[in-house]
Amino acid sequence: MTEEGLDLRGLLEFQDNRRCIDCGTGKSEYVLIDFGGFVCKTCFLLHSDLGLKNKLQHITDPITDQDLKQMVFGGNSALYEYWEVYDLNYKAISFKYLTLSAVYYKEMLASLRVNGNYYRDFLSLEKAKQLSQQSFDDRTPEPEPRPQKLKEKIEEAWEKLSLTLSDIIKTIKTKLKIHP
């Protein structure tokens, strides 16, 4: 609790903060202080698994005045609107929190907390979705394969699945004596 008598639970008075910023369904129990966002336990665990050096904590844990100020500047509404601009709201946690736009947002909130303003040019839509080397450098474990390799693996798996489905459909047509 801060000297002003506020704590993180007080920010739950705002309806948007009551639901998880990432999945939208879970009850907010944890906070991503660097992003000013509230998340459910499931999404908190996903964030923890990323291995980033972001400040994550339970809502009932003590919070410094500086961290609370950052949360006040943030909140789920602001983060949602920010992700919406860059079409990242419904992207995977393992992707959107590793983008340049994520680094930018963290810097913006930190600057607002310290200076009360932020005077940096906004990111272009193309640049915002690029993966940030800083995010990878900030990771504690070895970085996982970049999403491009993951995308290639998914496309390869989908191609195999499509071939398998195609074979199954052909077999069904043959057995039912349906000809194209």
Image (tube, rainbow, N blue to C red):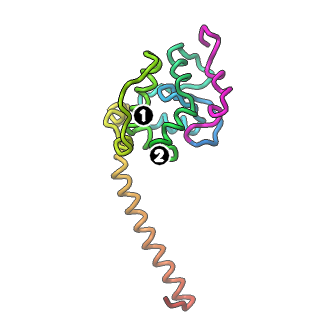
In the rendered view, does 113 fall on the left or right side of 15? left
Residue situated in front as seen by the camera: 179 or 128 = 128
Closest to the observer, 81 or 56: 81
- In the picture of the structure, the residue carrying the numbered disc 1 is 51
Residue 47: image location, x then y, percent? 49, 36
> The N terminus lies in which quarter of the figure?
top right
Q: Position of residue 10 (x, y in %)?
A: 66, 21
> Is 153 positioned to the left or the right of 45 in the image?
left
The answer to which image quadrant residue 100 occupies is: top left
- Determine whether 108 is above or below 174 in the image: above
x 40%, y 37%: residue = 101
Q: Is residue 34 left or right of residue 126?
A: right
Q: Position of residue 24 (x, y in %)?
A: 61, 42
Please tell me which residue lies in front, 150 or 110.
110
Q: What mark, if any, has residue 105 been given in the picture?
A: none
Which sits in the foreground, 57 or 5? 5
The segment highlighted magenta reads 1-22
Camera-near label (2 vs 1) is: 2
Tell me which residue sits at (57%, 37%) in the image. Answer: 21
| Residue indicated by mark 2 | 87
Q: Callout 1, which amino acid?
A: Gly
User: Pointer 2: residues within 10 angstroms few (<14), some, or many (20+)?
Assistant: some
Q: Is residue 160 magenta?
A: no
Say which label, 2 or 1, has the lower sequence index: 1
Pointer 1 local density, CA inside 10 Å: few below 14, some 14–19, many at least 20: some
Kind of element beneath mark 1: loop
Vertical comparison of 100 with 175: above or below: above
The spot of residue 154 in percent (x, y) is 41, 58
- Residue at point 57%, 89% (across, down): 176
Secondary structure of residue under mark 2: loop
Gap in angstroms between the C-alphas marked 2 and 1: 24 Å
* Residue 9 shown in magenta: yes
